[in-house]
Every structure is written in C-alpha cells, then in structure tokens.
Amino acid sequence: MKKLSLTLFSILVLISYSISNSSEKNLAKGKARIIDGDTIEIDKEKIRFGGINSPERNEVGYKLAKDKLTEKIENRNLICVREKNKDRYSRTVAECFVNGQSLSSFMVKYGYACDYLYYSKGKYADEQKYAKANKLGVWKMKYDSSWESKCRKK
C-alpha cells in the first residue's frame, strides 16, 4: 500500500510540475473525440499519444483499444502536455491526462497499447510487463505479431 501511495504521489507531483512548467501554449485542454486507441482530437487538433502504439483499424484489438479509451475518458475534460515536435502525419504529440492519470500509462498497463520503444525509450516498460504477465487486453488475443514487433523497434 505504501508503494502505491508513493507511486501515486510521485505521479501527481510530476504532473503538477509538468503543467506548472508548461506555458498555456503547450497545453491542449477540453473534451476529446476518440479517433483510435492512441489518437484523439480536441478542438479540431489531432493529438497522438507519445510513446505508445495501439492496434490500427485493420488489426486485432483495434475496437477494444478504442472502446476502452472512450470508456476511460467518458466525456471528461482532458489536459494534454504537447511535445515540441509533431509526428510524421503533422499531428500534435502529447501526453494526455484525465483526472490526473496518464492515458498513455493506462492504455499500456491494461494491454490496449504497447510501449513504443522507438519513441518512449522504455517509459512504459513496467506497464507493458504488467499487461503481458497478466494477459490483459490485446495480450490475451491472437494479435498480429507485426504489431508487437513495431513496438520493439528502437
């Protein structure tokens, strides 16, 4: 219990620090339209969650990931901290939070996305290890191995 409390406290401090040290121009706030398990839209700005990858439209787990993200957000306001660079499709890359919880961390921990090593540098490794060990989300499905391979690319 102490470890959980310490972890939660650390996350809240990190979020507060990130938000307080980010100018308003680095934040996107509002209700989101879910595009898929790792992409949303707030006020016509497409936002890709940095460091994770969820299954694409034609892959096993796509609907599950999109539905779980939709359920998690439930028409709540989000706060997204934008990264400096956009992705190759000109989408904003950001870490987004609902009620103080990182959506990227949530999606990976429960198996709806993977830790995309090329971009995350292992930021979500513990969450992915947990999801795989417990066969959560996509990890319990017969997913296309190219999805997992993409996650491992450095």
Image (spheres, grey):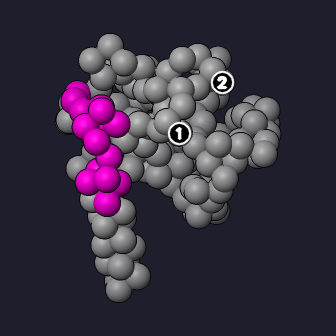
| Marks 2/1: CA–CA distance | 20 Å
The residue to which callout 2 is attached is 59
121 lies left or right of 63: right
Whether residue 23 sits left or right of residue 134 in the image: it is left
- Marker disc for residue 50: 1
Q: Position of residue 86 (x, y in %)?
A: 53, 26
- The answer to whether residue 22 is visible is yes
Q: Residue at x 58, y 25 (%)?
A: 87
From the viewer's perspective, is 66 left or right of 62? Answer: left
User: If you read the primary sequence from the N terminus, does the residue marked by circle 2 or circle 1 appear first?
Assistant: 1
Q: Quadrant of the C terminus?
A: top right
Q: Is residue 106 above or below residue 17?
A: above
What segment is highlighted magenta in the picture? 17-31
Give the foreground label among 2 and 1.
Answer: 1
* Secondary structure type for disc 1: loop
Q: Can see residue 73? A: no
Q: CB under 8 Å between callouts 2 and 1?
A: no
Q: Position of residue 134 (x, y in %)?
A: 59, 61
131 w.r.t. 10: above or below: above
Circle 2: element type = loop
